[in-house]
Image (cartoon, coloured by chain):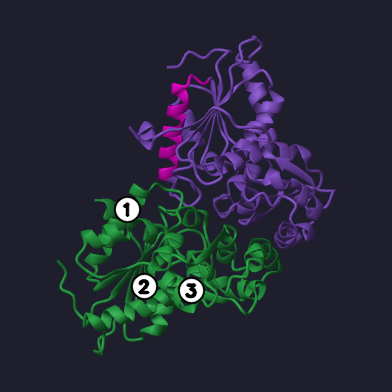
Chain colours: A purple, B green
Protein backbone atom coordinates (compact mmCIF):
# COMPACT_ATOMS: atom_id res chain seq x y z
CA UNK A 1 0.00 0.00 0.00
CA UNK A 2 0.97 3.57 -0.60
CA UNK A 3 2.57 5.64 2.09
CA UNK A 4 0.10 8.50 2.38
CA UNK A 5 1.84 11.77 3.08
CA UNK A 6 0.84 15.43 3.15
CA UNK A 7 3.33 16.28 0.42
CA UNK A 8 1.90 13.72 -2.00
CA UNK A 9 -0.33 14.79 -4.88
CA UNK A 10 -4.07 14.43 -5.28
CA UNK A 11 -4.97 12.04 -8.10
CA UNK A 12 -7.83 12.94 -10.42
CA UNK A 13 -9.16 10.90 -13.31
CA UNK A 14 -11.81 11.34 -15.96
CA UNK A 15 -12.82 9.54 -19.14
CA UNK A 16 -11.40 12.49 -21.05
CA UNK A 17 -11.08 16.20 -20.76
CA UNK A 18 -14.12 17.32 -18.76
CA UNK A 19 -12.48 16.56 -15.42
CA UNK A 20 -10.15 19.50 -15.96
CA UNK A 21 -12.99 21.80 -14.88
CA UNK A 22 -12.86 19.92 -11.56
CA UNK A 23 -9.06 20.32 -11.39
CA UNK A 24 -9.59 24.05 -11.91
CA UNK A 25 -11.94 24.23 -8.93
CA UNK A 26 -9.78 22.15 -6.60
CA UNK A 27 -6.74 24.12 -7.71
CA UNK A 28 -8.29 27.43 -6.74
CA UNK A 29 -9.71 26.00 -3.47
CA UNK A 30 -6.50 24.28 -2.40
CA UNK A 31 -3.54 26.31 -3.65
CA UNK A 32 -1.14 24.29 -1.49
CA UNK A 33 -1.94 21.01 -3.21
CA UNK A 34 -0.71 19.62 -6.49
CA UNK A 35 -2.32 17.15 -8.86
CA UNK A 36 -1.76 14.22 -11.09
CA UNK A 37 -4.51 14.16 -13.70
CA UNK A 38 -5.30 11.21 -15.91
CA UNK A 39 -7.70 11.61 -18.85
CA UNK A 40 -8.60 8.32 -20.52
CA UNK A 41 -8.92 9.96 -23.94
CA UNK A 42 -8.24 6.70 -25.81
CA UNK A 43 -11.29 5.02 -24.30
CA UNK A 44 -13.67 7.98 -24.03
CA UNK A 45 -16.70 8.03 -23.85
CA UNK A 46 -17.52 5.93 -20.78
CA UNK A 47 -21.22 6.85 -20.96
CA UNK A 48 -22.02 4.32 -23.69
CA UNK A 49 -20.05 1.46 -22.12
CA UNK A 50 -21.33 -1.26 -19.82
CA UNK A 51 -21.06 -0.88 -16.05
CA UNK A 52 -18.53 -3.72 -15.79
CA UNK A 53 -16.29 -2.08 -18.40
CA UNK A 54 -16.47 1.30 -16.65
CA UNK A 55 -15.61 -0.36 -13.32
CA UNK A 56 -12.64 -2.17 -14.89
CA UNK A 57 -11.34 1.04 -16.49
CA UNK A 58 -11.81 2.95 -13.23
CA UNK A 59 -9.76 0.37 -11.34
CA UNK A 60 -7.01 0.58 -13.97
CA UNK A 61 -7.01 4.38 -13.82
CA UNK A 62 -6.82 4.35 -10.03
CA UNK A 63 -3.91 1.88 -10.10
CA UNK A 64 -2.11 4.19 -12.51
CA UNK A 65 -2.61 7.15 -10.16
CA UNK A 66 -1.40 5.09 -7.19
CA UNK A 67 1.89 4.52 -9.01
CA UNK A 68 2.23 8.32 -8.89
CA UNK A 69 1.90 8.15 -5.08
CA UNK A 70 -1.37 10.04 -4.82
CA UNK A 71 -2.83 10.48 -1.35
CA UNK A 72 -6.45 10.66 -2.50
CA UNK A 73 -8.38 9.96 -5.71
CA UNK A 74 -11.05 12.24 -7.14
CA UNK A 75 -13.26 10.61 -9.77
CA UNK A 76 -13.95 13.69 -11.89
CA UNK A 77 -16.35 11.87 -14.18
CA UNK A 78 -20.05 11.54 -13.52
CA UNK A 79 -20.39 8.17 -15.27
CA UNK A 80 -17.50 6.56 -13.40
CA UNK A 81 -18.70 8.18 -10.16
CA UNK A 82 -22.16 6.74 -10.51
CA UNK A 83 -20.99 3.25 -11.43
CA UNK A 84 -17.61 2.59 -9.83
CA UNK A 85 -17.20 4.53 -6.55
CA UNK A 86 -18.26 1.69 -4.21
CA UNK A 87 -16.01 -0.80 -5.98
CA UNK A 88 -13.05 1.60 -5.84
CA UNK A 89 -13.62 2.19 -2.12
CA UNK A 90 -13.72 -1.56 -1.53
CA UNK A 91 -10.62 -2.19 -3.64
CA UNK A 92 -8.26 0.59 -2.58
CA UNK A 93 -7.22 1.73 0.84
CA UNK A 94 -7.29 5.48 0.33
CA UNK A 95 -9.93 8.21 0.23
CA UNK A 96 -12.02 8.26 -2.97
CA UNK A 97 -14.27 11.20 -3.82
CA UNK A 98 -16.77 11.20 -6.68
CA UNK A 99 -19.07 13.80 -8.17
CA UNK A 100 -22.56 12.54 -7.33
CA UNK A 101 -22.56 12.66 -3.53
CA UNK A 102 -20.98 16.12 -3.09
CA UNK A 103 -23.18 17.67 -5.79
CA UNK A 104 -26.33 16.14 -4.35
CA UNK A 105 -25.51 17.24 -0.79
CA UNK A 106 -24.89 20.81 -1.88
CA UNK A 107 -28.18 20.87 -3.81
CA UNK A 108 -30.09 19.63 -0.76
CA UNK A 109 -28.48 22.37 1.35
CA UNK A 110 -29.33 25.06 -1.20
CA UNK A 111 -32.92 24.26 -2.17
CA UNK A 112 -35.69 26.12 -0.39
CA UNK A 113 -38.73 24.84 -2.28
CA UNK A 114 -37.49 21.23 -2.56
CA UNK A 115 -37.66 21.29 -6.37
CA UNK A 116 -34.30 20.34 -7.88
CA UNK A 117 -33.37 20.05 -11.55
CA UNK A 118 -30.59 17.79 -12.82
CA UNK A 119 -29.00 18.13 -16.25
CA UNK A 120 -26.38 15.78 -17.67
CA UNK A 121 -25.52 13.42 -20.50
CA UNK A 122 -27.97 10.68 -21.50
CA UNK A 123 -25.90 8.17 -19.49
CA UNK A 124 -25.98 10.17 -16.25
CA UNK A 125 -29.68 10.97 -16.53
CA UNK A 126 -30.68 7.45 -17.58
CA UNK A 127 -28.80 5.72 -14.77
CA UNK A 128 -30.56 7.98 -12.24
CA UNK A 129 -27.34 8.58 -10.29
CA UNK A 130 -28.27 12.01 -8.93
CA UNK A 131 -31.94 11.09 -8.58
CA UNK A 132 -31.13 8.11 -6.34
CA UNK A 133 -28.64 10.02 -4.21
CA UNK A 134 -31.00 13.00 -3.77
CA UNK A 135 -33.87 10.70 -2.80
CA UNK A 136 -31.60 8.91 -0.35
CA UNK A 137 -30.80 12.26 1.26
CA UNK A 138 -34.41 13.46 1.34
CA UNK A 139 -37.36 11.38 0.14
CA UNK A 140 -39.62 14.43 -0.11
CA UNK A 141 -37.58 16.21 -2.79
CA UNK A 142 -39.14 16.69 -6.21
CA UNK A 143 -36.54 15.99 -8.87
CA UNK A 144 -36.74 16.90 -12.56
CA UNK A 145 -34.14 15.56 -14.97
CA UNK A 146 -33.21 16.59 -18.49
CA UNK A 147 -30.42 15.25 -20.71
CA UNK A 148 -28.55 18.04 -22.53
CA UNK A 149 -26.26 16.05 -24.87
CA UNK A 150 -25.22 18.94 -27.13
CA UNK A 151 -23.69 20.89 -24.24
CA UNK A 152 -20.60 18.64 -24.33
CA UNK A 153 -19.61 19.26 -27.97
CA UNK A 154 -20.60 22.93 -27.73
CA UNK A 155 -18.27 23.34 -24.73
CA UNK A 156 -15.45 21.42 -26.41
CA UNK A 157 -15.78 23.62 -29.50
CA UNK A 158 -15.54 26.70 -27.30
CA UNK A 159 -18.98 28.07 -28.23
CA UNK A 160 -19.42 29.24 -24.66
CA UNK A 161 -21.53 32.29 -25.47
CA UNK A 162 -22.51 31.60 -29.08
CA UNK A 163 -26.04 32.45 -30.14
CA UNK A 164 -26.51 28.79 -31.19
CA UNK A 165 -25.67 27.72 -27.62
CA UNK A 166 -28.36 30.08 -26.25
CA UNK A 167 -30.94 28.66 -28.68
CA UNK A 168 -30.12 25.06 -27.74
CA UNK A 169 -30.09 25.90 -24.01
CA UNK A 170 -33.51 27.53 -24.43
CA UNK A 171 -34.85 24.27 -25.92
CA UNK A 172 -33.32 22.11 -23.20
CA UNK A 173 -34.14 24.25 -20.16
CA UNK A 174 -37.61 25.62 -20.95
CA UNK A 175 -39.38 22.70 -19.28
CA UNK A 176 -37.25 22.92 -16.13
CA UNK A 177 -37.94 26.67 -15.87
CA UNK A 178 -41.68 26.03 -16.12
CA UNK A 179 -41.40 23.40 -13.38
CA UNK A 180 -40.24 26.13 -10.95
CA UNK A 181 -37.08 24.47 -9.77
CA UNK A 182 -34.95 26.67 -7.49
CA UNK A 183 -31.74 24.60 -7.76
CA UNK A 184 -30.09 23.04 -10.82
CA UNK A 185 -27.32 20.45 -10.62
CA UNK A 186 -24.80 20.68 -13.49
CA UNK A 187 -24.40 16.90 -13.65
CA UNK A 188 -21.60 16.85 -16.21
CA UNK A 189 -18.10 18.17 -15.76
CA UNK A 190 -18.31 20.06 -19.08
CA UNK A 191 -21.33 22.13 -18.11
CA UNK A 192 -19.71 24.71 -15.78
CA UNK A 193 -18.09 26.12 -18.93
CA UNK A 194 -21.58 27.03 -20.13
CA UNK A 195 -22.78 28.36 -16.78
CA UNK A 196 -23.20 31.91 -18.09
CA UNK A 197 -25.63 30.74 -20.79
CA UNK A 198 -27.35 28.25 -18.49
CA UNK A 199 -27.84 30.83 -15.73
CA UNK A 200 -29.27 33.41 -18.15
CA UNK A 201 -31.66 30.94 -19.71
CA UNK A 202 -32.85 29.24 -16.51
CA UNK A 203 -33.12 32.57 -14.67
CA UNK A 204 -31.09 34.25 -11.92
CA UNK A 205 -33.38 32.99 -9.17
CA UNK A 206 -32.19 29.41 -9.78
CA UNK A 207 -29.02 28.35 -7.95
CA UNK A 208 -26.58 26.38 -10.13
CA UNK A 209 -24.71 23.54 -8.43
CA UNK A 210 -21.23 22.79 -9.78
CA UNK A 211 -20.29 19.30 -8.57
CA UNK A 212 -16.64 20.23 -9.03
CA UNK A 213 -16.97 22.98 -6.41
CA UNK A 214 -18.93 20.67 -4.13
CA UNK A 215 -16.22 18.01 -4.50
CA UNK A 216 -13.48 20.57 -3.78
CA UNK A 217 -15.08 21.41 -0.44
CA UNK A 218 -15.23 17.72 0.41
CA UNK A 219 -11.62 17.17 -0.68
CA UNK A 220 -10.46 19.87 1.74
CA UNK A 221 -12.62 18.48 4.55
CA UNK A 222 -11.24 14.93 4.09
CA UNK A 223 -7.64 16.12 3.81
CA UNK A 224 -7.93 18.02 7.10
CA UNK A 225 -9.74 15.19 8.89
CA UNK A 226 -7.15 12.66 7.73
CA UNK A 227 -4.26 15.03 8.49
CA UNK A 228 -3.22 14.96 4.83
CA UNK A 229 -3.67 18.66 4.12
CA UNK A 230 -0.50 20.03 2.60
CA UNK A 231 0.73 22.72 4.99
CA UNK A 232 4.33 22.12 3.98
CA UNK A 233 6.28 24.15 1.49
CA UNK A 234 6.63 21.12 -0.78
CA UNK A 235 4.49 21.64 -3.83
CA UNK A 236 5.51 20.06 -7.12
CA UNK A 237 4.17 21.02 -10.55
CA UNK A 238 0.88 19.50 -11.66
CA UNK A 239 1.16 16.55 -14.04
CA UNK A 240 -1.25 15.64 -16.84
CA UNK A 241 -1.45 12.19 -18.42
CA UNK A 242 -3.70 11.07 -21.25
CA UNK A 243 -4.09 7.74 -23.03
CA UNK A 244 -4.37 9.47 -26.42
CA UNK A 245 -3.86 12.99 -27.74
CA UNK A 246 -6.96 13.87 -29.71
CA UNK A 247 -7.23 16.84 -32.02
CA UNK A 248 -6.89 20.21 -30.38
CA UNK A 249 -6.34 18.48 -27.02
CA UNK A 250 -4.04 21.12 -25.57
CA UNK A 251 -6.25 23.97 -26.78
CA UNK A 252 -9.41 22.44 -25.32
CA UNK A 253 -7.60 21.39 -22.13
CA UNK A 254 -6.43 24.95 -21.55
CA UNK A 255 -9.94 26.27 -22.16
CA UNK A 256 -11.23 23.83 -19.53
CA UNK A 257 -8.43 24.36 -17.01
CA UNK A 258 -8.31 28.12 -17.50
CA UNK A 259 -4.53 28.16 -17.73
CA UNK A 260 -1.65 26.58 -19.65
CA UNK A 261 -1.35 22.80 -19.51
CA UNK A 262 2.31 21.89 -19.18
CA UNK A 263 3.77 18.53 -18.17
CA UNK A 264 1.39 16.72 -20.53
CA UNK A 265 2.37 13.14 -21.27
CA UNK A 266 0.72 10.44 -23.35
CA UNK A 267 0.86 6.95 -21.88
CA UNK A 268 0.28 3.69 -23.72
CA UNK A 269 -2.85 1.72 -22.98
CA UNK A 270 -0.60 -1.23 -22.07
CA UNK A 271 0.56 0.80 -19.10
CA UNK A 272 -3.04 0.70 -17.84
CA UNK A 273 -4.02 -2.81 -18.80
CA UNK A 274 -0.68 -4.59 -18.45
CA UNK B 1 -12.93 -18.36 -48.81
CA UNK B 2 -16.54 -17.38 -49.19
CA UNK B 3 -18.63 -18.64 -52.04
CA UNK B 4 -19.67 -15.37 -53.70
CA UNK B 5 -23.18 -15.60 -55.08
CA UNK B 6 -25.71 -13.14 -56.48
CA UNK B 7 -28.19 -13.93 -53.75
CA UNK B 8 -25.75 -13.12 -50.96
CA UNK B 9 -26.00 -9.85 -49.06
CA UNK B 10 -23.82 -6.75 -49.26
CA UNK B 11 -21.87 -6.18 -46.04
CA UNK B 12 -21.55 -2.63 -44.72
CA UNK B 13 -19.69 -1.51 -41.63
CA UNK B 14 -19.15 1.76 -39.82
CA UNK B 15 -17.70 2.82 -36.48
CA UNK B 16 -21.24 3.58 -35.38
CA UNK B 17 -24.45 4.89 -36.79
CA UNK B 18 -23.44 7.28 -39.59
CA UNK B 19 -23.05 4.48 -42.13
CA UNK B 20 -26.81 4.05 -42.11
CA UNK B 21 -27.05 7.09 -44.40
CA UNK B 22 -24.96 5.06 -46.86
CA UNK B 23 -27.24 2.02 -46.43
CA UNK B 24 -30.16 4.31 -47.23
CA UNK B 25 -28.54 5.38 -50.51
CA UNK B 26 -27.51 1.87 -51.59
CA UNK B 27 -30.94 0.59 -50.62
CA UNK B 28 -32.71 3.05 -52.88
CA UNK B 29 -30.20 2.52 -55.72
CA UNK B 30 -30.25 -1.26 -55.56
CA UNK B 31 -33.70 -2.39 -54.48
CA UNK B 32 -32.88 -5.99 -55.38
CA UNK B 33 -30.03 -6.25 -52.90
CA UNK B 34 -30.12 -6.81 -49.17
CA UNK B 35 -27.64 -5.83 -46.49
CA UNK B 36 -25.90 -6.90 -43.38
CA UNK B 37 -24.89 -3.78 -41.45
CA UNK B 38 -22.43 -3.74 -38.59
CA UNK B 39 -22.05 -0.61 -36.45
CA UNK B 40 -19.13 -0.79 -34.01
CA UNK B 41 -20.96 1.31 -31.42
CA UNK B 42 -18.94 -0.12 -28.51
CA UNK B 43 -15.68 1.19 -29.95
CA UNK B 44 -16.87 4.41 -31.60
CA UNK B 45 -15.29 6.89 -32.36
CA UNK B 46 -12.55 5.65 -34.68
CA UNK B 47 -11.41 9.19 -35.51
CA UNK B 48 -9.40 9.61 -32.32
CA UNK B 49 -7.76 6.17 -32.48
CA UNK B 50 -4.39 5.26 -33.98
CA UNK B 51 -4.17 3.98 -37.56
CA UNK B 52 -3.07 0.53 -36.42
CA UNK B 53 -6.07 0.24 -34.10
CA UNK B 54 -8.49 1.34 -36.83
CA UNK B 55 -6.95 -1.20 -39.23
CA UNK B 56 -7.27 -3.97 -36.64
CA UNK B 57 -10.91 -3.11 -35.93
CA UNK B 58 -11.66 -2.90 -39.67
CA UNK B 59 -10.25 -6.38 -40.20
CA UNK B 60 -12.33 -7.73 -37.31
CA UNK B 61 -15.46 -6.06 -38.68
CA UNK B 62 -14.85 -7.47 -42.15
CA UNK B 63 -14.31 -10.97 -40.74
CA UNK B 64 -17.62 -10.65 -38.90
CA UNK B 65 -19.40 -9.67 -42.12
CA UNK B 66 -17.77 -12.56 -43.99
CA UNK B 67 -19.34 -14.95 -41.49
CA UNK B 68 -22.67 -13.59 -42.76
CA UNK B 69 -21.66 -14.62 -46.31
CA UNK B 70 -21.49 -11.14 -47.78
CA UNK B 71 -20.46 -10.86 -51.43
CA UNK B 72 -18.94 -7.38 -51.08
CA UNK B 73 -17.93 -5.04 -48.25
CA UNK B 74 -18.70 -1.33 -48.15
CA UNK B 75 -16.67 0.62 -45.59
CA UNK B 76 -19.25 3.27 -44.76
CA UNK B 77 -16.90 5.20 -42.48
CA UNK B 78 -14.60 7.92 -43.69
CA UNK B 79 -11.92 7.25 -41.06
CA UNK B 80 -11.75 3.51 -41.73
CA UNK B 81 -11.88 4.19 -45.50
CA UNK B 82 -8.93 6.52 -45.36
CA UNK B 83 -6.79 4.28 -43.17
CA UNK B 84 -7.72 0.64 -43.81
CA UNK B 85 -8.95 0.12 -47.41
CA UNK B 86 -5.61 -1.03 -48.87
CA UNK B 87 -5.03 -3.44 -45.99
CA UNK B 88 -8.55 -4.88 -46.33
CA UNK B 89 -8.07 -5.34 -50.08
CA UNK B 90 -4.78 -7.13 -49.43
CA UNK B 91 -6.26 -9.31 -46.70
CA UNK B 92 -9.61 -10.37 -48.12
CA UNK B 93 -10.48 -11.83 -51.46
CA UNK B 94 -13.67 -9.91 -52.22
CA UNK B 95 -14.58 -6.45 -53.49
CA UNK B 96 -14.12 -3.66 -50.91
CA UNK B 97 -15.56 -0.19 -51.49
CA UNK B 98 -14.76 2.81 -49.30
CA UNK B 99 -16.00 6.39 -49.20
CA UNK B 100 -12.98 8.45 -50.22
CA UNK B 101 -12.38 7.27 -53.77
CA UNK B 102 -16.01 7.37 -55.04
CA UNK B 103 -16.66 10.77 -53.43
CA UNK B 104 -13.47 12.23 -54.86
CA UNK B 105 -14.16 10.89 -58.35
CA UNK B 106 -17.65 12.34 -58.36
CA UNK B 107 -16.34 15.72 -57.23
CA UNK B 108 -13.76 15.77 -60.02
CA UNK B 109 -16.51 14.98 -62.56
CA UNK B 110 -18.76 17.72 -61.21
CA UNK B 111 -16.41 20.66 -60.73
CA UNK B 112 -16.18 23.22 -63.50
CA UNK B 113 -13.88 25.78 -61.89
CA UNK B 114 -11.57 23.22 -60.24
CA UNK B 115 -12.23 24.63 -56.76
CA UNK B 116 -13.46 21.90 -54.42
CA UNK B 117 -14.37 22.19 -50.75
CA UNK B 118 -14.18 19.29 -48.32
CA UNK B 119 -15.92 19.22 -44.94
CA UNK B 120 -15.59 16.44 -42.38
CA UNK B 121 -14.58 15.58 -38.84
CA UNK B 122 -11.20 16.71 -37.47
CA UNK B 123 -9.84 13.21 -38.16
CA UNK B 124 -10.86 13.14 -41.81
CA UNK B 125 -9.64 16.67 -42.50
CA UNK B 126 -6.38 16.24 -40.59
CA UNK B 127 -5.41 12.99 -42.28
CA UNK B 128 -5.90 14.65 -45.69
CA UNK B 129 -7.72 11.60 -47.10
CA UNK B 130 -9.86 13.49 -49.64
CA UNK B 131 -7.12 16.00 -50.35
CA UNK B 132 -4.62 13.27 -51.32
CA UNK B 133 -7.14 11.36 -53.45
CA UNK B 134 -8.30 14.53 -55.25
CA UNK B 135 -4.72 15.59 -55.95
CA UNK B 136 -3.96 12.08 -57.21
CA UNK B 137 -6.87 12.39 -59.65
CA UNK B 138 -5.97 15.90 -60.79
CA UNK B 139 -2.94 17.81 -59.55
CA UNK B 140 -4.34 21.15 -60.73
CA UNK B 141 -7.37 21.13 -58.44
CA UNK B 142 -7.59 23.73 -55.70
CA UNK B 143 -8.86 22.13 -52.52
CA UNK B 144 -10.17 23.90 -49.44
CA UNK B 145 -10.86 21.92 -46.28
CA UNK B 146 -12.84 22.74 -43.16
CA UNK B 147 -13.60 20.55 -40.15
CA UNK B 148 -17.23 20.84 -39.00
CA UNK B 149 -17.20 18.81 -35.77
CA UNK B 150 -20.57 19.97 -34.41
CA UNK B 151 -22.46 18.64 -37.44
CA UNK B 152 -22.20 15.08 -36.04
CA UNK B 153 -23.91 15.70 -32.69
CA UNK B 154 -26.41 18.11 -34.29
CA UNK B 155 -27.41 15.39 -36.77
CA UNK B 156 -27.59 12.71 -34.06
CA UNK B 157 -29.82 14.99 -31.97
CA UNK B 158 -32.10 15.44 -34.96
CA UNK B 159 -31.64 19.23 -35.18
CA UNK B 160 -31.72 18.96 -38.97
CA UNK B 161 -33.30 22.36 -39.59
CA UNK B 162 -32.89 24.02 -36.20
CA UNK B 163 -31.96 27.69 -36.13
CA UNK B 164 -28.87 26.79 -34.08
CA UNK B 165 -27.75 24.46 -36.88
CA UNK B 166 -28.06 27.30 -39.41
CA UNK B 167 -25.98 29.60 -37.19
CA UNK B 168 -23.24 26.99 -36.75
CA UNK B 169 -23.26 26.14 -40.48
CA UNK B 170 -22.92 29.84 -41.24
CA UNK B 171 -19.79 29.99 -39.06
CA UNK B 172 -18.26 26.86 -40.61
CA UNK B 173 -19.06 27.51 -44.27
CA UNK B 174 -18.54 31.26 -44.61
CA UNK B 175 -14.86 30.90 -45.54
CA UNK B 176 -15.59 28.20 -48.16
CA UNK B 177 -18.30 30.38 -49.73
CA UNK B 178 -15.87 33.28 -49.99
CA UNK B 179 -13.33 30.98 -51.65
CA UNK B 180 -15.75 30.46 -54.57
CA UNK B 181 -15.80 26.68 -54.52
CA UNK B 182 -18.34 25.16 -56.94
CA UNK B 183 -18.33 21.64 -55.43
CA UNK B 184 -18.45 20.57 -51.78
CA UNK B 185 -17.70 17.03 -50.60
CA UNK B 186 -19.72 15.97 -47.54
CA UNK B 187 -16.81 14.00 -46.10
CA UNK B 188 -18.69 12.47 -43.19
CA UNK B 189 -21.54 10.01 -43.38
CA UNK B 190 -23.60 12.11 -40.94
CA UNK B 191 -23.58 15.24 -43.09
CA UNK B 192 -26.14 14.29 -45.76
CA UNK B 193 -28.75 14.59 -43.00
CA UNK B 194 -27.91 18.29 -42.82
CA UNK B 195 -27.78 18.81 -46.59
CA UNK B 196 -30.76 21.17 -46.62
CA UNK B 197 -29.03 23.55 -44.19
CA UNK B 198 -25.62 23.12 -45.84
CA UNK B 199 -27.03 23.79 -49.32
CA UNK B 200 -28.87 26.93 -48.18
CA UNK B 201 -25.84 28.32 -46.38
CA UNK B 202 -23.22 27.49 -49.03
CA UNK B 203 -25.52 28.63 -51.87
CA UNK B 204 -27.46 26.79 -54.57
CA UNK B 205 -24.70 27.23 -57.14
CA UNK B 206 -22.47 24.82 -55.17
CA UNK B 207 -22.91 21.11 -55.95
CA UNK B 208 -22.95 18.91 -52.84
CA UNK B 209 -21.23 15.53 -53.14
CA UNK B 210 -22.67 12.75 -51.00
CA UNK B 211 -20.03 10.00 -50.82
CA UNK B 212 -22.78 7.52 -49.99
CA UNK B 213 -24.43 8.18 -53.37
CA UNK B 214 -21.06 8.02 -55.13
CA UNK B 215 -20.32 4.70 -53.42
CA UNK B 216 -23.76 3.34 -54.40
CA UNK B 217 -23.02 3.95 -58.07
CA UNK B 218 -19.71 2.14 -57.70
CA UNK B 219 -21.35 -0.76 -55.83
CA UNK B 220 -23.76 -1.27 -58.73
CA UNK B 221 -20.94 -1.03 -61.30
CA UNK B 222 -18.82 -3.60 -59.47
CA UNK B 223 -21.73 -5.97 -58.92
CA UNK B 224 -22.56 -5.93 -62.63
CA UNK B 225 -18.93 -6.29 -63.70
CA UNK B 226 -18.39 -9.21 -61.34
CA UNK B 227 -21.71 -10.79 -62.25
CA UNK B 228 -22.86 -10.51 -58.66
CA UNK B 229 -25.85 -8.24 -59.28
CA UNK B 230 -28.93 -9.77 -57.72
CA UNK B 231 -31.37 -10.37 -60.54
CA UNK B 232 -32.91 -13.31 -58.73
CA UNK B 233 -36.10 -13.22 -56.70
CA UNK B 234 -34.16 -14.14 -53.57
CA UNK B 235 -34.03 -11.13 -51.32
CA UNK B 236 -33.85 -11.62 -47.57
CA UNK B 237 -34.56 -8.98 -44.95
CA UNK B 238 -31.78 -6.54 -44.04
CA UNK B 239 -29.92 -7.34 -40.83
CA UNK B 240 -28.40 -4.84 -38.41
CA UNK B 241 -25.72 -5.71 -35.86
CA UNK B 242 -24.12 -3.40 -33.30
CA UNK B 243 -21.46 -4.00 -30.66
CA UNK B 244 -23.37 -1.90 -28.11
CA UNK B 245 -26.82 -0.34 -27.93
CA UNK B 246 -26.29 3.28 -26.97
CA UNK B 247 -29.04 5.61 -25.82
CA UNK B 248 -31.73 6.29 -28.36
CA UNK B 249 -29.97 3.98 -30.82
CA UNK B 250 -33.11 2.79 -32.56
CA UNK B 251 -34.56 6.30 -32.79
CA UNK B 252 -31.36 7.78 -34.26
CA UNK B 253 -30.85 4.77 -36.54
CA UNK B 254 -34.33 5.20 -37.98
CA UNK B 255 -33.70 8.91 -38.51
CA UNK B 256 -30.53 8.04 -40.43
CA UNK B 257 -31.96 5.14 -42.38
CA UNK B 258 -35.24 6.87 -43.11
CA UNK B 259 -37.29 3.80 -42.20
CA UNK B 260 -37.84 1.33 -39.35
CA UNK B 261 -34.81 -0.66 -38.20
CA UNK B 262 -35.89 -4.22 -37.55
CA UNK B 263 -33.66 -7.28 -37.15
CA UNK B 264 -31.35 -5.36 -34.83
CA UNK B 265 -29.01 -7.55 -32.78
CA UNK B 266 -26.28 -6.70 -30.31
CA UNK B 267 -23.18 -8.88 -30.53
CA UNK B 268 -20.48 -9.25 -27.89
CA UNK B 269 -17.06 -7.76 -28.53
CA UNK B 270 -15.64 -11.26 -28.00
CA UNK B 271 -17.38 -12.27 -31.19
CA UNK B 272 -15.19 -9.73 -33.00
CA UNK B 273 -11.92 -10.18 -31.17
CA UNK B 274 -12.10 -13.87 -30.32
Q: Residues within 10 Å of mark 2 (few under 14, many from 20)?
A: few
Say whether disc 3 or disc 1 marks the residue closer to the N-terminus. Answer: 1
Mark linked to residue B263 = 2
Q: Are marks 3 and 2 on the same chain?
A: yes
Q: Which residue is mark 1?
A: B55
Chain bearing tag 3 is B
- Is residue B16 in sight in this rendering? no
- Is residue A250 in sight in this rendering? yes
Separation of marks 3 and 2 at Cα, in angstroms:
27 Å
Q: Are marks 3 and 1 in contact (CB under 8 Å)?
A: no
Question: Residue at 49% of width from left, 65% of height from top?
Answer: B187
Mark 3 element type: strand
Residue B147 quadrant:
bottom right
Confirm whether the magenta stretch covers residue A252: no
**Front one among A226 and B164:** B164
Q: Which residue is mark 3?
A: B210
Give the residues in magenta. Answer: A52-70
Q: Is residue B249 left or right of residue B170?
A: left
Amino acid sequence: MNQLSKANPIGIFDSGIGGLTVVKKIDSFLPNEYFVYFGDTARVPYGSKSNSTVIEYSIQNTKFLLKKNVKMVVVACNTASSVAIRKLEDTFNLPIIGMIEPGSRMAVEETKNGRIGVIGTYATINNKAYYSELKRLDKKLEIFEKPCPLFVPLAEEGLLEHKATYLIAEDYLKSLRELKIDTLILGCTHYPLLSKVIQEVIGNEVKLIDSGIAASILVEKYLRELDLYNNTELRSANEFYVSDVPNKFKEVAELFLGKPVNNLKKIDLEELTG
